Each structure stands twice: as structure tokens, then as C-alpha cells.
Image (tube, helix red, strand yellow):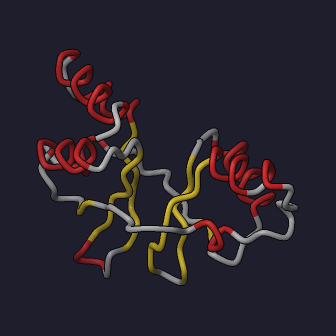
């Protein structure tokens, strides 16, 4: 099984210069808790609903003035559409990633989907899922 077989295809980038209030509206409309942040066609980060609350609202900042790119930090982990499921799980577990962007390397690293815990729950057995959730939840 490959990443393409389990990802959901409704992934949508938020531009780095978009405001966090707009990001929150997109999350609500799409019923997701995270959005990939893109600068042009390049994936530069991930933005979660928690990031908006902790790094903007709780700090007293105005989400209509803070940009998504302001919260893009650290390395962005992603996999290619042709990555084996076992490798996807390894990367997610080792880096404690709950949401994995899926890129098509043959199309210039175009974002084509996302893999999250609910996608994994539909694709792997309960034992593997429990191992994954434990590995991602417990800090190294």
C-alpha cells in the first residue's frame, strides 16, 4: 500500500501571507484541524488550530493581523505519493507527526493530499494503529 492509497485528496494550502483569522475560517469550512502553509508552490510549514490559539490568541495578538507564514517553523516533513505505508508510518512515528502532507515529486513537489490519524485508522489494523498513536503521543 502506498501513500496515495490512504491519503485524503482534499488538501488545500493556505498562502503564507494569509491571515490567521482566514486560516481559522478555512479550517472550519473544511472541517480540518491543520492546513499546509505554502509560499507559491512550495510547502513551508503546517498550521494547526492549536498554533492559532497558543501562538496568536493566547499571546494577545490579533489573528486578522498575523500571517500564516509567521507561524511556519522548523522542518516540514512530507512524503511522496509513491512512499510505502510502512515508511510513512516510520516517518510519522519517529517525528511525532499526526498529519503528513503528501507531495507528487513528479509534478514539482505539488501538494496532492494529506494523511492523518483517521486515514490510518481506515487502512491499518488496530494493533498497528495503537502502536502509532502511542509513538506519536509519547515525547522522545
Which percent across, then down, holds residue 40? 53, 84
Quarter-wise, where is residue 63 in the image?
A: bottom right
Seen at 32% across and 75% down, the residue is 109
6 vs 37, left or right, is: left
Quadrant of the rendering where the C terminus is positioned:
top left
Which percent across, then down, holds residue 117? 38, 33
Report how many numbered discs are placed on residues in the image.
0
| Whether residue 137 is situated above or below residue 14 in the rendered picture | above
Which percent across, then down, holds residue 42? 45, 79
> Foreground: 88 or 66?
66
> Foreground: 117 or 134?
134
Q: Which residue occupies the extreme top position in the image?
A: 126
| Whether residue 27 is situated above or below residue 109 in the rendered picture | above
Quarter-wise, where is residue 83 in the image?
A: bottom left
60 vs 113, left or right, is: right
Seen at 33% across and 44% down, the residue is 96
Seen at 34% across and 38% down, the residue is 139
Amino acid at each position: 500500500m502506498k501513500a496515495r492509497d490512504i491519503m485524503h485528496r482534499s488538501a488545500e494550502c493556505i498562502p503564507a501571507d494569509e491571515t490567521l483569522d482566514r486560516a481559522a475560517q478555512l479550517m472550519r469550512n473544511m472541517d480540518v484541524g491543520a492546513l499546509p502553509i505554502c509560499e507559491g508552490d512550495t510547502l513551508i510549514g503546517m498550521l494547526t488550530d492549536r498554533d492559532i490559539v497558543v501562538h496568536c490568541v493566547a499571546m494577545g495578538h490579533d489573528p486578522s493581523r498575523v500571517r500564516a507564514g509567521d507561524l511556519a517553523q522548523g522542518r516540514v516533513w512530507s512524503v511522496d505519493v509513491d512512499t510505502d505505508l510502512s515508511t510513512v508510518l516510520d516517518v510519522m512515528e519517529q517525528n511525532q507527526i499526526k498529519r503528513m502532507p503528501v507531495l507528487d515529486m513528479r509534478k514539482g513537489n505539488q501538494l496532492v493530499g494529506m494523511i492523518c490519524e483517521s486515514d490510518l485508522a481506515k487502512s491499518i489494523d488496530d494493533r498497528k494503529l495503537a502502536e502509532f498513536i502511542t509513538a506519536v503521543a509519547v515525547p522522545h
